[in-house]
Amino acid sequence: MAYAAVTSLMRTIHQSMELTGCDLQPFYEKIESLRAILEKSCNIMGDHEGLIILEVEIVEVAYTTEDMVDSESRNVFLAQNLEEISRAMWEIFFVLEQALEYIDCTMKQWMATSDSMKDLKPQTSSLVSLPEHAVEQPENIMVGRENVLEMMLDQLVRGGRELEVVSIVGMGGIGKTTLATKLYSDPYIMSRFDIRAKATVSQEYCVRNVLQGLLSSISDEPDDQLADRLQKHLKGRRYLVVIDDIWTTEAWDDIKLCFPDCINGSRILLTTRNVEVAEYASSGKPPHHMRLMNFDESWNLLQKKIFEKEGSYSPDFENIGKQIALKCGGLPLAITVIAGLLSKISKTLDEWQNVAENVSSVVSTDLEAKCMRVLALSYHHLPSHLKPCFLYFAIFAEDERIYVNKLVELWAVEGFLNEEEGKSIEEVAETCINELVDRSLIYIHNLSFDGETQICGMHDVTRELCLREARNMNFVNVIRGKSDQNSCAQSMQCSFKSRSRIRIYKEEELAWYRSSEAHSIIMLGVGEFKCVTLELSFKLVRVLDLGLNICPIFPSGVLSLIHLRYLSLCFNPCLQQYRGSKEAVPSSIIDIPLSISSLCYLQTFKLYFPFPNDCAYPFILPSEILTMPQLRKLCMGWNYLRSHEPTENRLVLKSLQCLNQLNPRYCTGSFFRLFPNLKKLEVFGVLDEFHNHKDLYDFRYLYQLEKLAFSIYYPFVSCFLKNTAPSSSTLQDPLRFQMETWHEETDFMGIALPTLLLPSPDAFPQNLKSLTFRGEFFLAWKDLSIVGKLPKLEVLKLSHNAFMGEEWEVVEEGFPHLKFLFLDNLDIRYWRASSDHFPYLERLFLRCCEYLDSIPRDFADITTLALIDITHCQQSVGNSAKQIQQDIQDNYGSSIEVHTRNLL
């Protein structure tokens, strides 16, 4: 992981320049040039001891340099006089000069070693270049997939007379080659095409070998003559060419000109693991994505392979066999590997049960099956910047739902992502996720209502590969309880000396790392720490995520972790100890020390309070929390800021991108001037804090804001601050709180009163793309005309009685740019609107709108509409959606998706 370590060092140098003002650009550019050399050499595969030793040296130097640059840059930031500043800056230059000299020397050895290995490359690459068809068995893997075969046959023989390229895409071992082989050998295909040819491109491809494979001959002719001969051989004939296992668009560009278009219905069939390659080569039609087998298909394949000869088996073996089939996760290659193993071992229930309990590890260690070698091709072919992204998935548990937002947060602070001009680091992270999806290494588990990837996952067998490579590179270590302590002892000892990322499950496991130099510590699960304060002695940690494990109080040891980039904590607010007291709370009460601002590298700070049982207490936070210069994301829970009024010397947080759970009373123009680059904002508080603050909601200075949400917090009993004017809360005044049971406020007529008064359209940020109202604001539907005037609004989410009234009649221009509309738990009965009010609507989601009678019929004229999703609404709503679907089909010849669930 030398590439990742050097990239992280570059990020640290860049952060140092921002923090100190030092001109370190020459160092940055020199390291960047060294990284480029490293990138060219890192694609050599196999275990090369010489390169591994040099890589470890580069990693250690890079991380040690980072730590020293961090420390000295912080000294500059906190210095009290020019002498301290000069001394610290001199140390930064000295450290970087020494590191550059060492890395430069090591890189020369790296290049020399790499050059000496060029002659060995064919032998070493053969260790991992086993083609996937070498372990697939066509007669079995197509079990249950006859419909896919028929569909692909139809696609190859029908269509126009022009040459068409048809692509099959999917992860390694899913059966692409098998499907292509079955198509190639189908009798109908054989009679349809005058000539057929096939060749395997593979990862380490050679154009000459591909051409010779297609010509079925060995020749001494130059490549251009081979290409010319192939073209002449195909010209004038209807041909089918199968190009199997192609990895890059460059490989396709090298051979595509060899295939003439004779306007006679010729076809080229490609198989690839990379969606980008499939889409690049295909003739306008979407590639066929090979899906994983369902349970029935998996079991049919397994029993056909094992029991076909014997003809019968006992119910006990069937039950265990079905467990095994299920745990293979629908991957045909894994099923055939396990089937091969089961056919060799003794047929005892104990032996089979042992296999059932260790399916993934059996697949990854069975040398005869070579399953991991097939899957490892995808990892080894990754470009340098994607390898750490792939290995990072080892941090997550098997079958865990991996939320993309959380993944992006972690990647953004880990240091291994490349900075790209014109892109935020979060946008770079999202691009990397999409690249891994396109390469079939991870899959999309769930999309959000507006079409963004919400949850992703990794197949269990691919995860075994990920875990193995992550441990080998000491990139991630996962420890699960005492049972793992001995088995992972060697890995753990290694992680004490180097900057590994560590995932733990229990509080006591923190003690194992007291003397470690862990780069990241991520704790999962929900629980309570037994210790009053955490002993946090891993001083070099950069990412500390304690999840939803509850600390009794703020762990003061965090303040000594000066390298922190990411901090996530859950603890009880101090106000809880004053429960039942009738006296004013002392003004000195505060949940987080003022010195939190000394964590000058902190980029993400997430604060959670325990889920309330009968009463909730807010955090009392220092305004110094808003003076951390590198801060990009801040989630504060329900809170009040002490002395929050802006002052002349207050730091403008140019880096802040996301601010969650901001108390409504701070939504002032003067406050928002501190965050000129804010992109996401959630305004969050109890009912009382939203009342009568129309003059406060001034968002016009948030020029970059794209997402805005208003959310009400509903504890059964809340303890809220009584002094309502922002200027009345000072460090000298005692805090006066009032306990109040939540109730719905009504006027004398019994009608619910609006909780929030919308500001005028010009007080909203003009770049706003997404707007959410969540909670009982009881706004009038007519107020949405204000929202409709926002010039760039694309996403609107309304939930839990955010708007009140039986009828929503959309007026004026409506929502001219809206693409996604989400209505949830609203009492609306009648919806009056036309297609002109939502001219660009793409996706409509309706949840628990139990009184709504129908969707406006005129929506059938919205030509952009692609999806209507309905849950827990009246049957009449579902009927209206089906009618809109039919009208669109009849009038425009296009189709939309309609999903309905649990209709009333």
Image (spheres, rainbow, N blue to C red):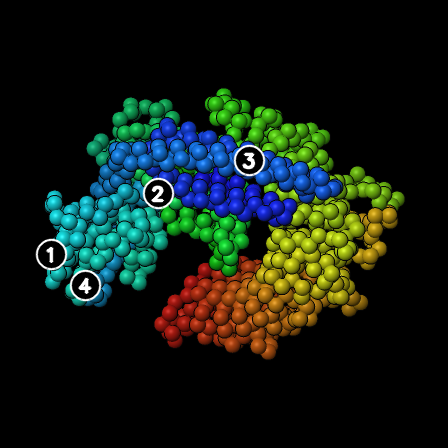
What residue is drawn where x is 33% and y is 40%?
Answer: 377
Tell me the amino acid under the disc marked 4.
Answer: Asp
What residue is pinned by disc 3?
A: 65
Asked if 496 appears above or below 618 in the picture, the reply is above
Quarter of the image with the N terminus is top left
For marks 1 and 3, the one nearer the N-term is: 3
Residue 869 visible somewhere in the drawing = yes
Q: Residues within 10 Å of mark 1 (few under 14, many from 20)?
A: some
Q: Considering the numbered disc 1 on the image, is that residue within a helix, a strand or a loop? A: helix
197 or 717, which lies in front?
A: 197
For marks 2 and 1, the one nearer the N-term is: 1
What residue is pinned by disc 4?
A: 261
Q: Considering the numbered disc 3 on the image, is that residue within a helix, a strand or a loop? A: helix
Q: Position of residue 516 (x, y in %)?
A: 57, 27
What residue is pinned by disc 2?
A: 381
What residue is pinned by disc 1?
A: 233
Asked if 441 appears above or below 729 in the picture, the reply is above
